[in-house]
Structures are given as C-alpha cells and as structure tokens.
Image: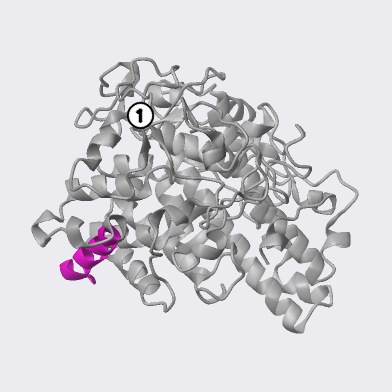
Amino acid sequence: MRSQLIKITGMIAAAALFLASCTKDLDRQPKYGNTAASLYVNLAGYKSVMAKVYAGLTLTGNNGPDGSGDISGIDEGFSSYIRQYWSAQELSTDEAVIGWNDATIKDFHHMTWSPADVFIRALYSRIYFQITLANEFIRESDASKVSDRGISGADATEIAFMHAEARFLRALSYYHAMDLFGNVPFVTEDDNVGAFLPNQITRANLFNYIESELKAIETTLKDARTNEYGRADKAAAWALLSRLYLNAQVYTGTAKYSECITYCNKITAIPGYALINNYRNLFLADNNTTSGSEFIFAVNFDGNKARTWGGTTFLVHAPIVGSMQAGDHGVDFGWGGVRTTKQVVQKFSGPVGDSRQNFYTSGQNLEINDISSANDGYGIIKFRNKTSTGGNGSNPTWVDTDFPFFRLAEIYLNYAEAVVRGGSGGSSATALTYINNLRQRAYGNASGNIVSGDLTLPFLIDERAKELHWEAVRRTDLIRFGQFTEGTYLWAWKGNTLNGQAVGAHRKLYPIPSADLVANPNLRQNDGY
C-alpha cells in the first residue's frame, strides 16, 4: 500500500551504502548494526529495504528532515532528489526563476554554473546515492541468493518483482545522469564492493545500457496497472523508453522516433489508462486517488509519514509569492521564491479558456527586472496541498501531493512529436487526436482544437510547455528542439542578461563536480568547464 512505500525506519539504514562526495565509495560496505545477513532473511526484510530504494526519490534521510540527511555538504532540505532534479530541469529554462540568494541558486537561471556549484554536486550525489541503493538491492535479490536463504514460492516470486523494480529505478537514475551530465561514472551490482575507482562510461554506451536494462525487465516487471500505487510496472519501463527514444538523437546522434512510437503504443493499448477530466486535480493532495488512470509512475509524498523540505513540499511552498495566500494552497506559509517568465505567459495567447493557464498576476509584474524581487514575474498555481473536494492535505507544513514522473499526457505528446519528426508505426490522424484530447480537457470543449496543418514542431514545443510546465522536462525538451543554449529562443535573464542571450553550447551538459574529479582520476570533465 501507499503507506508501506513511505514508512522508513532505522532498520533499513543498512541500505544506505554511501559516502556523500566520492564515487570511489559507491559500493562501500555499511557501518551499521544491520547487515545483509540480518535483513535479507524473508519477504518482509526485502520489502523494508526496497522501501528505502523508493524513498531515495522522496526523502532526504532516515529520520525525517532533522538535519542528518543522506547527502553531506549541503543543507538537508536542498538535498532532495526531486527538488534538485526539478531545479536543474526548470530553473535553467524559461519556465522558472527563483529569487533567493542561497549560495549559487541563481546561477541555474543565469546559466553561469561551475563545476564547484553546491547544488549540482548535491544532485549528482543524490543520483549516485540512488544508484548505490539500487545496486545493493539488486545484488542481494539475485535469484540464487534468495534460494540460498531458503526463500521460495510466492515470497520468492514477489522478491523477483522487486528485483526488476530496483533495476528500473537504477535505469531511471542512470537516465538522469546521462541526460544531465553526459559521460559519467558507471557501477553495477557485478562490481566488487569498494574495490576500485569507477570508470567513466560514454553517453552513447550508457544509452545502450539503459535501453538494454529496460528491455530486459519488460517481461519481469508486474503487468501495467497491477502493482501497488507508486511502484514501477511494465508501463513505467515503457514510458522511460519512450522518453529515452524521443531524445536518442541528442544522446547518441541517431534518431529513434519509430521506437518511441512503439513504446507509446504499448502504453495507450493498456485498458484503464485515460486522461482525467480536470487538469488541475493532477497536482493536488489527493492525486493518488483521483489521477490513477493518468499516472504511469508517480513519486509518493505524505505530510505525516514522509516529511521533507524538498519534493512537492518545495513545489507548493516556494511558488507562493507576493499577495498569494498560503491557506489557498493548503499550507501554513509561503517561501516567496519561484515565478515564471513572460515568454511562458505569452504561450497562452491563443483561444481563451485554457485551464492550464494558471498564472497569479495580482500585484505581480510581467517583466522580471530583478530576479530577487518576488513581485517580478507571474506566479504559477500548479502543485497545491489541497484536495479535489476543497479540503486541506493532512499537514499544513509538509505536503501530501505526489509528483508524476510519467503520465499519459506526456505519452500523447511524445507520440505526436515522434510522428511529426518522421517516425514510423504511428499516424498523423492519431497524433492529432491525442493533441486535441489534451486541448479538449484544457478548454472543456472543442474550442481549442487544432487541425492537421497546425501540428508542427514549433506548435509542439509550446504545447509541451502548456501541458508539462514545472514537471521537470523543460530543459530536456529545449535541448531537443535546439532552443536551450542557442539564440533562436530567448527568455528573461537567459545568459544573465535582462532580455536573454545565447550561451556556450557546453551548457547543454552540467559539469562533473570538482570534488568527484579530485577523488577519481578516471573521470574527465565535460568540455567547456
């Protein structure tokens, strides 16, 4: 159940085999009283460690947000996987600016980050912490080890499903590493614990590895829509493959749009997947119950059982700016930080009535003359700690809202783009239907529908911004469309100038953190840093 995935106790600290700064310690043995011999003895023990692997996407430590998190060298609240991943994917784009002066946080939007950036290092460390957790579970849930421990029958079958889920979670984190950093350190369950400095794998080879892992677990994950909410199934693997293939030309130089269509088709063929009626309900405190038909893989949050200053707690509190009332968002106070640029606002200049146009304008300036001013830039009302019936979440400080990593709307958009880009196995008519389904939901009728001639790449990049803004895909999208570092599309303060300017192409990748380069001589820095 949902609560089983978010209830983390001290007994699973043994899964946290991590030293925060150095990838040379990715597989170090734990210094805890609990060991593999005492944990991996039955299904309950395996499930408790599996919970920690999932919780790596949600929580920042084993004891709540008390300052003793998994990642050292940064305030625990900033060390959340979702918070740092979101910052790298959104603050570096037109979709978000942040007004705080914490360390180098503004460097994301200015696109002036360096290898010494504390937030980039935290994200990198969090990704590799997650990979380490997954490697440990995969190693210990190998079928031969399970058998040697006397576990058989239905319990062994369930552990085999979890083994596949851990491989999915590792593939997801390696995908993030590949997308954000390019050529990165590489360790799997087959490497001896603590015996070596990891070698660097090329982006193209890591693409091939992620692809092979996801295809390998296609048949071993639970069928789509049959697993517990918040746990991965076959459709989650298909969704990641869809995203992987859509971006294959960026990662490898070879387009794979037909493959993207293939995996979109696998998902849309599953009975039960459907767009929910109300777009805004996707991002509310009870989205675990209202949005199941659209969510393919969501990361669970709970204001009482899974407290963190990151995740959706950050995404609800931080965008409350100016005269916005915290109570309207189901929380006790706002953090006065995150807004959006006028370039995003202007994308909604078409037919009126688009429910995805969720800007807060009262007292806010459209122009961002000063990023530090919480009144410069419109607010966005998206993630809220309110329920679909108007109630509040379970806690006014920590948020219940789950974060959708993959949902059906993205699959519709992926399919349409892959068709427009020339992929085979799909049809323009189906692509048009998918896009109009999204727009009919947004407008409540057919007034926003488009015709076949409107279905172009410029239309699609803007439609993705309307549908998926603040869902941590924007940087990847802009890179794929040639608009991230280039001067073909500018937004406020891109390149640290008021009206925006092009930046060096090397900014399409983040740098390998300086601390890891010092610790591991096998690593080479990305060009330009």
Q: x, y percentage for residue 167?
A: 59, 61
Q: Residue furthest bottom?
A: 153
Range of residues picked out in magenta: 423-440
Q: x, y percentage for residue 357?
A: 32, 44
> Is 270 on the left or on the right of 423, as rendered?
right
Q: Where 164 sits versus 512, above or below?
A: below
> Is 182 on the left or on the right of 354, as rendered?
right
For the N terminus, give its image quadrant.
bottom right
Kindly state the secondary structure of the residue where label 1 is placed: helix
> Is 194 on the left or on the right of 315, as rendered?
right
Q: x, y percentage for residue 458?
A: 18, 45
Residue name at image x 52 percent, y 49 percent: 174
Residue 527 appears in the picture as rendered: yes
Predominant secondary structure in magenta? Answer: helix
Residue name at image x 55 percent, y 54 percent: 387
Towards the viewer: 473 or 384: 384
> Is 167 on the left or on the right of 72, as rendered?
left
Q: Quadrant of residue 528?
A: top left
Residue name at image x 65 percent, y 55 percent: 54
Q: Where 227 sits versus 411, above or below?
A: below
Q: Which residue is mark 1?
A: 506
